[in-house]
Image (cartoon, helix red, strand yellow):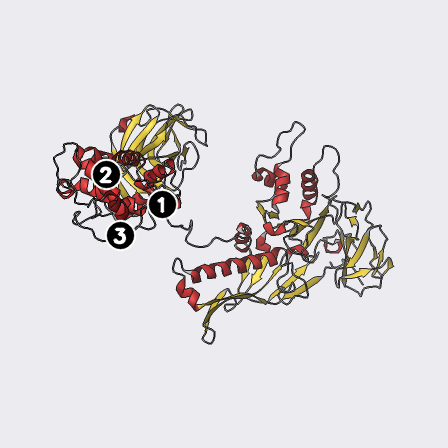
Amino acid sequence: MEADFSGYATKAGLKCSDGRTILPNAFQHQDTMTVPLVWQHGHNNPENVLGHAVLENRQDGVYCYAYFNGSSKATHAKELVEHKDISMMSIWANDLIERGKRVMHGVIREVSLVLSGANPGALIDNITIRHGDMDDTMLDDEAIIYTGLEFEHSNLALTHADGANSGATIQDVYDSMSPEQQEVCHFLIGQALAGDDAEDAAGTEPDMAAHSATGDGATVQEIYDSLDENQQELLHYMIGEALEGSDTAQHDNVGGYSGDYNKKGDNEMKHNVFENNDAGGSQSVLSHDDMKGIIADATRSGSLKDAVDSYALSHGIDNISTLFPEVVATSQEPNFLARRIEWVSTLLGAVNKSPFSRIKTLNADITIDEARAKGYVKGNLKSEEFFGVTRRVTTPTTIYKKQKMDRDDIVDITDFDVVVWLKNEMRIMLDEELARAILLGDGRDPSSADKINEQNIRPIASEHELFVTTLTVNLKDTPATGVTNADELIDAILANRWQYKGTGTPTLFTSETIIASFLTAKDTLGRRIYASLAEVATVLRVAAIVPVEAMEVGSLGAYGNTTIIGIIVNPVDYTVGATAGGEVNMFDFFDIDYNQQKYLIETRCCGALTRLKSALVIKNAVTSTDTVVTTVNAPTFVKGTGVVTIVASTGIIYINDEDGSTMATGAQTAISAYSTITVSAKAASGYLLPSDGASRTWTFTREA
């Protein structure tokens, strides 16, 4: 019995990604052995066994011949293989012995069809390793070995009308015919292609005597009756292929030409696809020699239709488009042109979820000097520590997306479930909008009725300085000799990394443009500094670097903050609150007056950072001429009087963090006893804060 497909189960001499190499004849003791053929190494269900495979040891690896069983899953898998949707195999092996990273022996337990190989060579994914004597290593647990090589398909086999497979190929059956039987085969296929037009031109009927090699004058019906089952099935298949080659073929039994061949029935063709409609009225017809050539091509390629197309092209037929099949969609559902949204699941999957739709944040700053422990001198008065407590409340807002479709369209679209497709699009867009509002803000004009209120979903990019540290880097100027923009950005992040007070190791959300600047950075010899994004993440001391298409310049719209080039944050420090009724909900409504089905998806929630200084927001200069401030003077404070004095600094604006007001140069109004004031320094327009890692926030407390 001929194998359904074959290919290399594993190749010798291929180096694995972990440094191991499979030696020749490592599995030679399994030559001619039979092992199960399974799907995706599925061991939890006997239905995953699709058949068996016979192993053949070769000098360059182990080759296998695979045979499907008669189960429904095997039939489906066979169709995937024949259609070349699946083209990869792997093996499961155990009892592996290696010496010096070279696999010398093992036992193949199964061959599996897989969606894709792990790499172009072989990969041994070990689970348990036990070291033995000398430098041998015995791998008691299993290993899955991928070759990454496509297997070979067998020749096209002849399938009977009842679905049974005889195991014989088209070439085998055709060669088994006698010369006169082959002549009848050619004649009947020519009749199927030519139809009435060719018949009238020839002046003969289908029951004419066959011009066989023996010249015995037997009729077409007699010779057809002399064909065995396989030969008749081959003839039916070829006639069906020939009929499918024309858009104008009129037949009821495509692929199965049955019945009395001396009578004209529904299987006649109303138009000759090979006719020539030029002014001369000449006509191209298929001769027996032509048909022999087409049959020979068909047995090699496995498709009679392709062979007929090739014949037509070589003979200059003008209306070749008649032979082409109908247009077929490459996918069942329409594809979306959308932004890359992988970052959305990374962010939304990691944020802290609260079952309450109103978030109250209480924070106390104990970094000020007044909160420090103090030394005691005998006889002196022990003074109390002072620090303030801040409170912030974030309330919920509704975010929604609405769609509608005429019911007539829903009923008429039968190729796919348009309602499911539409609801998937609505959920994708809702999740992306919520994630963008959390990270950056939605970028809409503040006066727009569609804007997501930033007091309800507080964007990390524009959060209060109490919760984030803003870092400005000028990537628009010309860097110094030997320094790249990537160097400037990395240096600035590392210098200010100490200001991150969030949970654990954060994640850097940035644009593909910034990522490209990291990966294209080169040393003085032209070699790339970073081989992968993981290396950059290690240098920046972040868990991962996640590309966000919404952070590309201009992607946030006219009102978006296009100066933001990166946000370092651990999403767990951002809390999204929603009650049981405010989570994501989908609503359907049928408008009987307009015969429309309407859909609404919405969520009602709030969101805000709940940990102080839990994010670093990295901004780019507005213009290349922005000036870096050289000196930032700290305000002075008198504890006894509670008076803060602002010392002027060129390019610096001082902000009262309690109410967000700007503080003028000079002495300020005294604060009350036991109260606290926090002052922050910000760069004025046209200026940049220096990236030296120094603190720009000062907190003062009046003692009495």
Residue 71 left/right relative to 555: left
Kind of residue at disc 3: His
Whether 105 is drawn above or below 480: the answer is: above
Does residue 504 appear left or right of residue 412 in this picture? right
Disc 2 is placed on an element classified as: helix
Whole-number angstrom distance, CA of label 2 to CA of label 3: 19 Å
Spatial CA distance of label 2 from label 1 is: 19 Å
Whichever of callouts 2 and 1 sits on the residue coming sooner in the sequence is 2
**Most foreground residue, 393 or 701:** 393
- In the image, what residue type sits under mark 1? Leu
Residue located beneath label 3 in the image:
251
Is residue 223 visible in the rendered image? The answer is yes
Tag shown at residue 323:
1
Q: Position of residue 295 (x, y in %)?
A: 27, 36
Residue situated in front as seen by the camera: 594 or 380: 594
Q: Which mark is residue 629?
A: none
- Image quarter in which the C terminus is found: bottom right
- Using the image, tell me which numbered label, if any, was put on residue 186: 2
Regarding residue 74, the answer to whether it shows in the image is no
**Residue drawn where x is 74% and y is 52% of the image:** 374
Please state which amino acid type lies under the numbered disc 2: His
